[in-house]
């Protein structure tokens, strides 16, 4: 099958209005992406290479199914086993498990979490609207996020323990079983979990037996999130053109404008380094934001 070449416009700087267009064949695009993803034989790295650097090069490792994330990292690092990935998560703490693009679980470099918090907290997730009986008001959502941040400070809680603490801190409405889930029902507050992670209020903690736990974000990310402003800023202007698809103003309680701009610009650059060439719509779909 014959494909038209991929056309990309290059700019010398922010003042360059015209730029120049270059053409790349699809084999060239694929080769670049494979190399940036660490999947080309020449790019293979030994076990001594930093796992966080590899995950950063992937722009996060999808971990909705944890063994798949472990395999995806192992493919890029010779001699790495699932045990090495778990050590990076729970002993070395060079990786962190949290909700990332599209509200799905990802492994991220702990050092990059402030960037991810700044970026993801500003991107409105495009989820199907919940029925009225399930929804939370903006005030209730903010109360849940604040409660999660408070109760997880210095703690590692299972979902049942976290649920009891959030309901106690916010009110019985948060515990209403209104969310259909796996032939069961979840309490209302759980629809704000990915938002809380994007605000830097929670990450996954080490398993307690067969149970998942949640805990506070690492110190650097927590400090970054503490710069939250009660008054949302609309002045953040991302540096890269691809951020146009995700430049909606942050909601109340989101990060200050400068933090959003720094985080979103950094994430766009990381995304383009891993997946480029790409445009605003591709970035928006990957991040889970509105397209167009």
Image: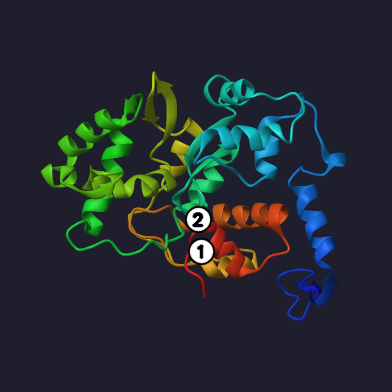
User: How far apart are the two marked residues, 1 and 2, measured between alpha carbons?
Assistant: 7 Å
Query: Which of the two discs, 1 and 2, labels the residue nearer the N terminus?
Result: 1
Q: Nearer the viewer, residue 105 or 94?
A: 105
The residue sitting at the bottom extreme is: 18
Rendered location of residue 58, percent (x, y): 67, 45
Residue drawn at 25 percent across, 46 percent down: 189
Q: Position of residue 143 (x, y in %)?
A: 24, 47
* Label 1: which secondary element: loop
Which of the numbered marks, if any, corresponds to residue 236?
Answer: 1
Would you call the spot at circle 1 few (<14 residues within 10 Å), some (14-19), or many (20 or more)?
many
Q: Secondary structure at mark 2?
A: helix
Q: Is residue 253 visible?
A: yes
Please say if 74 is above or below 241. above
The answer to whether one can see residue 143 in this image is no
Contact check, label 1 and label 2, Cβ < 8 Å = yes
Q: Where is mark 2, residue-wise?
A: 260
Closer-to-camera residue (63/52): 63
Q: What x and y, as percent, mark residue 238?
A: 58, 64
Going by the image, does 205 lie left or right of 258?
left
Q: Is residue 131 left or right of residue 244?
A: left
Q: Residue at x 39, y 18 (%)?
A: 209
- Quarter of the view holding residue 256: bottom left
Vertical relation: 58 (above or below) 136: above
User: What residue lies at 22% left-to-right and 37% top-to-bottom?
Assistant: 166
Q: Position of residue 96 (x, y in %)?
A: 53, 33
Q: Is residue 209 left or right of residue 131?
A: right
**Residue sitting at the far right:** 42
**Which quarter of the figure is the N terminus placed in?**
bottom right
Image point 43% across, 47% down: which residue?
A: 198
Q: Quadrant of residue 50?
A: top right
């Amino acid at each position: 099958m014959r494909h038209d070449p991929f056309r990309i416009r290059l700019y010398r700087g922010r003042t360059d209005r015209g730029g120049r267009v270059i053409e790349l064949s699809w084999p060239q695009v694929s080769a670049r992406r494979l190399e940036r993803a660490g999947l080309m034989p020449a790019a293979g790295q030994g076990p001594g290479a930093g796992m966080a650097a590899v995950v950063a090069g992937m722009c996060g490792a999808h971990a909705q199914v944890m063994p798949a994330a472990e395999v995806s990292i192992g493919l890029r690092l010779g001699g790495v086993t699932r045990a090495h990935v778990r050590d990076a998560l729970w002993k070395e703490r060079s990786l962190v498990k949290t909700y990332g693009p599209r509200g799905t679980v990802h492994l991220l470099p702990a050092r990059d979490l402030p960037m991810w918090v700044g970026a993801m907290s500003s991107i409105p997730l495009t989820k199907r609207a919940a029925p009225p009986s399930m929804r939370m008001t903006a005030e209730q959502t903010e109360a849940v996020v604040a409660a999660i941040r408070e109760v997880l400070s210095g703690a590692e809680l299972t979902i049942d323990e976290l649920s009891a603490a959030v309901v106690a801190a916010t009110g019985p409405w948060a515990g209403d079983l209104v969310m259909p889930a796996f032939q069961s029902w979840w309490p209302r507050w759980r629809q704000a979990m990915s938002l809380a992670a994007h605000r830097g209020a929670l990450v996954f903690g080490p398993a307690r037996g067969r149970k998942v736990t949640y805990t506070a974000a690492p110190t650097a990310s927590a400090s970054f999130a503490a710069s939250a402003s009660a008054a949302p800023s609309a002045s953040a202007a991302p540096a890269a053109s691809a951020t146009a698809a995700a430049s909606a103003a942050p909601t109340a309680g989101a990060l200050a404008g400068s933090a959003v701009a720094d985080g979103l610009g950094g994430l766009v650059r990381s995304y383009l380094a891993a997946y480029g060439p790409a445009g605003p719509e591709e970035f928006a779909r990957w991040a889970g934001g509105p397209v167009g």
